[in-house]
């Protein structure tokens, strides 16, 4: 029997207020923009992105920290990369038994580290490490690039709590190449605009630049402000020094440089928003991200991380050790147990945030961060940065150890230097480095950045090798 035809009665609605109408229009506009944003991504890239996202959704970690993706990366490397084939001699060794890969080994065996079975048409060269030594060249493939993108999206979603594609954001970026690249390509510019995103060139920040950046932040009203730690700090200082008004984002995303607790507090106070860090590098991409509970979760689906002591044994919980990275998603030149040059603190227990990825309690920065006193004691660069932090007339600085008993302090300031403060800094530096340490001050126009635009506040040219550091440890 047919149902009787019924007429759906309209619901009586109060007429929309002007504010409601404007909000409704804004929402529709946003939806159109989001649709256009997705259309601006090339169909093959969009497909690749969606496939990788669904692969990530199925990723499962075993209780031992391994995964089928890691197993596959290792068996592919053992079978198709001449360097590993030689080193393993055909034996299927567990990861802990693979040789450690240093920067020097990569430089000496560059072609032997390339996979023989891969399509080289989609390979790209990437460079890193120009600040403390020779630059390192690594080869990455198309799949690596997409996975790196997806990993950052995961960080946005899980740890920053925002949509990775269309959340309004302002980026203070220091890499000249990337900022200029984004400016040159009209499609990139269009995509940035559709994604409500601004990328500002923070390679060099003059007072005019800072005024322009602040105006951009206040106009864009971003939910996320992303940047190099030093750029964010510089911006925060500009706001605080001039007692200026700044938009408060939902979260600050800091990357690329060591973040001191004092600097974090200062940035959080000025922007009234929490800072979360992403730990990554050019050689291997994103490695770990900071969750709302302050723990670093390792992105095991992208990179597997081990923390080992100076002899190469697994470091104990609560202690600091060297980071070894194994790439899970770069078949072109898979780096296995790559000694990246950073230290991490092994976590004790699990993180209360509920995220299933493994954790490290903290990333402690580069070996070159450690200074060696004439008496052979190790001094963490963080101590020297703390000494400098309270001297507000110093706008930028870099402390370089050029000899066992000599430090050069390069600094930028807008007002005249205050001798009393300088004497105080020298006293506190000698407290750690010993009385025989000579300190030379150099007033400069600007402190040179690394080729990728990073500002290194401390660097030691004396013992950059961790094994040597270990030897001189008292
Ligand atoms: Zn957590």
Image (cartoon, rainbow, N blue to C red):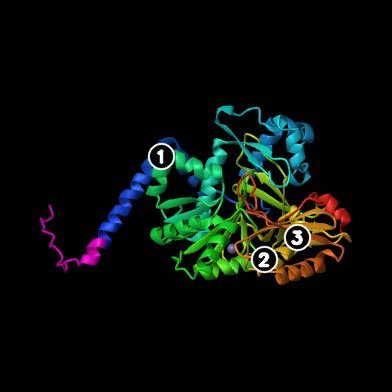
Mark with earlier residue (2, 1): 1
- State the separation of the CA atoms marked 2 and 1: 47 Å
Q: Is residue 316 shown left or right of residue 374?
A: left
Nearest to the eye among marks 2 and 3: give it.
2
- State the separation of the CA atoms marked 3 and 1: 45 Å
Residue 126 placement (x, y as % from top left): 62, 38
49 magenta-colored: no
15 magenta-colored: yes
State yes or no: Cβ of the residue under disc 1 lies below 8 Å from any atom of ligand 1: no
- Label number found at residue 417: 2
Position of the C terminus, as image quadrant, is: bottom right
Residue 71 placement (x, y as % from top left): 66, 42
Q: Which residues are magenta?
A: 1-22
Residue at 64 percent of width and 52 percent of height: 62
Nearest to the eye among marks 3 and 1: give it.
1
- State the separation of the CA atoms marked 2 and 3: 37 Å
Residue at 73 percent of width and 67 percent of height: 422
Viewer-side residue, 351 vs 104: 104
Mark with earlier residue (2, 3): 3
As drawn, 10 above or below 193 = below
Task: Name the residue beneath numbered marker 1.
Answer: 187
* Secondary structure mainly formed by the magenta segment: loop
Task: Name the residue beneath numbered marker 3.
Answer: 320
């Amino acid at each position: 029997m047919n149902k009787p035809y019924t007429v759906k009665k309209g619901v009586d609605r109060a007429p929309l207020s002007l504010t409601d109408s404007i909000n409704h229009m804004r929402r529709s506009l946003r939806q159109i923009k989001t649709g256009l944003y997705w259309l601006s991504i090339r169909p093959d890239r969009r497909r690749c992105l969606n496939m990788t996202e669904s692969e990530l959704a199925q990723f499962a970690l075993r209780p031992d920290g391994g995964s089928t993706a890691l197993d596959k990366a290792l068996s592919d490397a053992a079978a198709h990369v001449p360097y590993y084939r030689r080193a393993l001699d055909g034996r299927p060794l567990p990861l802990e038994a693979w040789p450690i890969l240093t920067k020097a080994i990569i430089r000496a065996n560059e072609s032997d580290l390339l996979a023989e079975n891969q399509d080289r048409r989609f390979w790209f060269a990437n460079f890193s490490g120009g600040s403390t030594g020779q630059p390192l060249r690594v080869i990455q493939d198309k799949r690596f690039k997409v996975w790196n993108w997806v990993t950052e999206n995961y960080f946005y979603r899980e740890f920053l709590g925002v949509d990775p594609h269309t959340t309004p954001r302002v980026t203070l970026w220091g890499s000249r190449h990337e900022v200029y690249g984004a400016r040159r390509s009209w499609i990139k510019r269009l995509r940035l605009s559709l994604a409500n995103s601004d990328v500002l060139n923070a390679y060099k920040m003059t007072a005019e630049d800072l005024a322009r950046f602040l105006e951009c932040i206040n106009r864009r009203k971003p939910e996320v402000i992303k940047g190099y730690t030093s750029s964010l700090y510089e911006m925060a200082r500009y706001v605080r020094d001039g007692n200026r008004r700044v938009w408060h984002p939902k979260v600050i995303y800091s990357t690329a440089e060591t973040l001191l607790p004092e600097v974090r507090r200062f940035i959080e106070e000025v922007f009234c928003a929490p800072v979360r860090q992403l730990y990554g590098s050019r050689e291997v991409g994103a490695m770990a991200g900071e969750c709302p509970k302050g723990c670093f979760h390792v992105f095991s689906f992208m990179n597997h991380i081990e923390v080992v002591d100076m002899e190469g044994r697994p470091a104990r919980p609560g202690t600091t050790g060297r980071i070894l990275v194994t790439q899970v998603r770069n078949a072109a030149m898979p780096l296995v147990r790559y000694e990246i040059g950073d230290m991490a603190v092994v976590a004790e227990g699990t993180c209360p945030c509920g995220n299933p990825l493994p954790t490290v309690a903290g990333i402690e920065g580069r070996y070159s961060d450690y200074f060696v006193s004439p008496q052979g004691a190790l001094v963490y660069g963080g101590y020297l940065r703390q000494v400098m932090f309270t001297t507000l007339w110093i706008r930028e600085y870099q402390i370089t150890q050029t000899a066992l008993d000599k430090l050069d302090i390069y600094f930028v300031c807008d007002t005249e230097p205050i001798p009393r403060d300088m004497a105080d800094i020298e006293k506190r530096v000698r407290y750690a480095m010993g009385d025989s340490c000579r300190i030379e001050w150099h007033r400069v126009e600007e402190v040179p950045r690394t080729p990728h635009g990073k500002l290194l506040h401390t660097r030691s040219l004396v013992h950059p090798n961790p094994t040597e550091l270990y030897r001189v440890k008292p």
